[in-house]
Amino acid sequence: MKHFFSIAINTVMICLISVSLSTAQTTKAHPSRAILLKTIKQNFEDAGKQYKVLIKNLPPDKFPKTYFPKTGKYEFSGSEWWCSGFYPGSLLYIYQQTKDEALLKENNRILGVLEKEKFNKTTHDLGFMMYCSFGNAKDIAPKPEYKDILIQSAKSLSTRFNPTVGCIKSWDSKKGDFLVIIDNMMNLELLFWATKVTGDSSYYKIAVTHANTTMKNHFRADYSSYHVINYNSETGAVQQKKTAQGYADESAWARGQAWGLYGYTVMYRETKNPIYLEQAKKIANFILTHPNLPTDKIPYWDFNAPNIPTALRDASAASVMASALLELSGYVDKNLKKTYIKDAETMIYSLSNAPYKAAIGTNGGFLIEHCVGHIPQGTEVDVPLTYADYYYLEAMKRYKELKK
């Protein structure tokens, strides 16, 4: 009975906080490139100011996780949390655009706190944690030691690969289960880099095998993806296809679709195998032509959420989608390129305006509002999230660098 009332209360709260976004099908005109570039320039300046608010409020050994505007309270994490790489990664993206040395100083400090995770073999998220941080640092503000840190991170990640299943394990579970989530596609980039710098092809082979197994089992006929596949750890057989953070096992959880789109775009970049390009294009088609995608291109938290159009939006999913689409646009014919860029422009512009972009000094220093973490669990619902900021910044950086 207690469980029932908990679900009921969560449902009522979600409906209430979604009302303010129910009219967020913005009627803003599609921005010109000149207007969007001007907006992006301002956004990076604003981001520097916002992240100084975060810096001021961050405990020395913690990482920003989220902020609750109604109470004015933060939630922080340790370095072992899967999102720990996004804060330094965001600092680096902002520093690259603004040259504000205070942001680089904070990045260097927090990387020192994060470094020990290179030995962490309990998580599949070392790509997020170490490549979004040290991986960006090696390019934006390099230090000699970053190479060894990343190689060790790739070694640790590789220990979670099961050749019988053909995947890297995502979550540890009961004996016999081998849980793999679509999010894991985002951690493969670290392995490709490791093969390039070490000459050890085992990292490359693990990434390709994982991607192929995921392509076979995670996707439906319409190229939407399940969130979680439970394999038999001994035989590799599929035991369950389900969700954890989506609305239902057969629904299309929005951020999961974004992870797949981004992941297979990276797969094509790193291998030039056309099967991955086709996969990315089909995932993009599912997202961009879906009847439940709002006109402002900020998706509902699940494409099959039961209370559309009053369902909550997930700005974090839009951030990931926009960044992925901009890269994917460089690999396709001119008509698809135009479509992908136009939709990414709409996403970036929507995120850069109310109700998604936070006013300076608000939102605890986070850039983006109205993200959804885990509705079924009732956590991180309609709040800022570090990965929304990170991929929003990355999308804007990619747009600035775009050759149209």
Image (cartoon, rainbow, N blue to C red):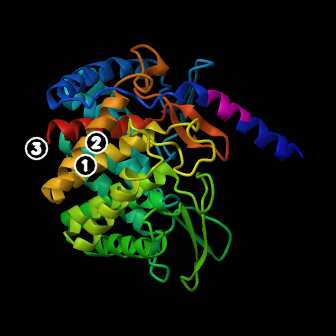
Q: Position of residue 232 (x, y in %)?
A: 60, 79
State which quadrant residue 56 falls in.
top left
Amino acid carrying label 2: it is Ala
Amino acid at the residue labelled 3: Lys
* Label annotation for residue 384: none
Percent x, y of residue 83: 46, 43
Query: For the point 21% across and 62% down, which residue is it?
Result: 269
The quarter of the picture where the C terminus appears is top left
The residue singled out by tag 3 in the image is 404
| 383, above or below 178, in the image | above
Who comes first in sequence, dot 2 or dot 3?
2
Q: What x and y, as percent, mark residue 104?
A: 26, 28
Taking the magenta stretch, the answer to whether it contains residue 14 is yes
Q: Nearer the viewer, residue 398 or 26?
A: 26
Q: Is residue 65 left or right of residue 115?
A: right
From which residue to which does the magenta span run? 12-17
User: At x 60% / y 59%, what residue is drawn?
Assistant: 243
Residue 353, image x and y in percent?
A: 36, 23
Characterize the local packing of mark 3: few (<14), some (14-19) or many (20 or more) Cα atoms within 10 angstroms: few
Give the image quarter of residue 14.
top right
Dot 3 or dot 1: first in sequence order is 1
Q: Are marks 1 and 2 in contact (CB under 8 Å)?
A: yes
Look at mark 1 in the image and give the residue it sits on.
340
Quadrant hosting residue 382: top right
Residue at label 2? 344
